[in-house]
Amino acid sequence: MKLSLVYLAKPVLHGYFRSSCSWRVRIAFALKGIDYDLVPVNLIKDGGHQKSQQFKTLNPMQQVPAVEIDGMVLSQSLAVIQYIDETRPGHPLLPADPKKRAQVRMISDLIASGIQPLQNLYVIQKIGAEKVQWSQHFINRGFQALEPILKETAGKYCVGDEISMADICLVPQVYNAERFKVDLDQYPTIKRLNQALLDIEAFKVSHPSCQPDTPVDLD
Amino acid sequence: MASQTKPVLHGYFRSSCSWRVRIAFALKGIDYDLVPVNLIKDGGHQKSQQFKTLNPMQQVPAVEIDGMVLSQSLAVIQYIDETRPGHPLLPADPKKRAQVRMISDLIASGIQPLQNLYVIQKIGAEKVQWSQHFINRGFQALEPILKETAGKYCVGDEISMADICLVPQVYNAERFKVDLDQYPTIKRLNQALLDIEAFKVSHPSCQPDTPVDLD
C-alpha cells in the first residue's frame, strides 16, 4: 500500500486578508478544523503581488485565493471549498438533500458570479473614478435578488438551520457591502443572517481584521 | 416522496448560461419545455414583474424543476446530475471534480459575468473592447490550465461541466471577435465538443426562439 505523503502536508493558502474570496476559504478551513499555512499576497503593494511571474505560475488568472493542497494547486474558492468538503471529515459544508444543495449552490453562485466579480479590485481599478457607485449598484442589485430568495430558504442560516457554503459566501459579501457603504437596512434577512454568523467562531477567527497580514493601522 | 417533473427552462437562445443548461439536459437525455425570454425586445422580458417573481436577479436561465425554481446554471446542472441517471456531468474522483469546478467557475465567475448583456449595456460605447479584454484575460488563464488538465476533453477524457461551460464561452468570444488562434487548447477542445450531438442540438442557431434572420 502506497502511503501518499502529500496527504499529510498542510494546505497552503495564498490569500489576502481583505479578499472576500480568500475569506470564504479561511471560513471553510475553520469550520472543518483544518490547519493551514498562509502565504500573504498583497494585492495593493508594488502594483500588486498577484501580478508577479511567480504568482502567475500558481494561478494564471492572477487572483486570490490559490490553494496548494494534496499535490494540486486549486483556484476558485468554491472549487476549493467543495474539494475540502468532499475529502475532509467534520461539519458538512453542503446539505445531504439534493434540493437543499441546489439552493446552497444557487445562493453561493448568485454571490460568487453575480455580485463579487463585478466589484472586485481588478474591475474597480478599470472602472476608475465611478467605482463606488458602480460597486454599490452591483451589490444592491444582487442583494435585492438575494433578500427574497433568502426569505424563502433561510431558517437559522441561509438554507435551513445548518451552516453551509451559502453562509460562507454571504458574510464576506456583506463585509464588502459595508466597505462600499451599502445600506443594509434594506435587506433585513441578509442583515439578520450576517449578524448570527458573525457570532460563530469560524467566522470570527477568519475575519479580515485579525489575519497575519492585516495591517496594524487598518481603519 | 419528491416527484420528478418535466423541467421548464426559461431561457434565451443566445444566452450562454441558458445554453449550458440545454447542453446538460441533452447529455442526460432530459426532455424539457422551453419558455423563451427575449432579453432584447420591449426593453427585455427578463425585466417584467412576472419574470422577476421567478428569478429576482432578472437573469436567464431560470428552471422550474421538481417543485422548485432554480437559477444559476451551475446549480441547475449539478442538481440534475445528482438526481437524474445517465452520463455523469462531474467525475467521480474528488481531485478531477475540483478541476472541473475550477474551470467551470473561472468561466462562470471570471469571464461571463463581465461580458453579459446587463454589464455591457452599462459600459456603453466601449463594450466591445471591455468584453474582449475580459474574455482574453480569462482565456489567457484558462489555456495553461487546460494544457494541464485536458485529455480528449477539458478534464481527462470524459465530458464534464467544464466542457459545458467552455463551448458557450467560446461562442461569446467569437461574437466579440476574439482571436482564438492564441488559445490552441481551447480551440481544439471547442472543435471536438461541437461535434457532439448534445452540443449540436442545443446550439443557439437552432432553438425554437432563434430568429429566422439570425446572422
Image: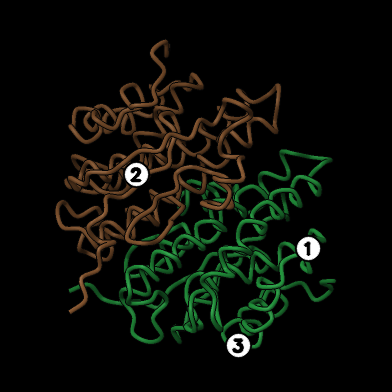
Chain colours: A brown, B green
Please report contact status of discs 1 and 3: CB closer than 8 Å, yes or no.
no
Count of labels in the image: 3
Nearer to us: label 2 or label 3: 2
| Mark 3: amino acid | Ile
- Residue B120 placed where, x, y %? 72, 45
Marks 2 and 1 share the same chain: no
Depth check: A141 or B200 in front?
B200
| Mark 2: amino acid | Val
Looking at the image, residue B175 lies above or below residue B135: below
Chain identity of mark 1 = B
Q: Which residue is mark 2?
A: A25
Within-10-Å neighbours for mark 1: few <14, some 14–19, many 20+: few
- Residue B149 placed where, x, y %? 51, 71
Alpha-carbon distance for marks 1 and 3? 21 Å
- The residue sitting at 31% across, 28% down in the picture is A207
User: Could you tell me which secondary element the residue under label 2 belongs to?
Assistant: helix
Q: Is residue A193 left or right of residue B180?
A: left
- Residue A124 placed where, x, y %? 63, 31
Alpha-carbon distance for marks 2 and 1? 35 Å
- The residue sitting at 51% across, 33% down in the picture is A139
- Residue A55 placed where, x, y %? 54, 45
- The residue sitting at 29% across, 61% down in the picture is A6
Q: Is residue B158 left or right of residue A203?
A: right
Which quadrant of the view contains residue A111?
Answer: top left
Q: Quadrant of the N terminus of chain A?
A: bottom left
Q: Which residue is mark 1?
A: B175
Q: Which residue is mark 3?
A: B196
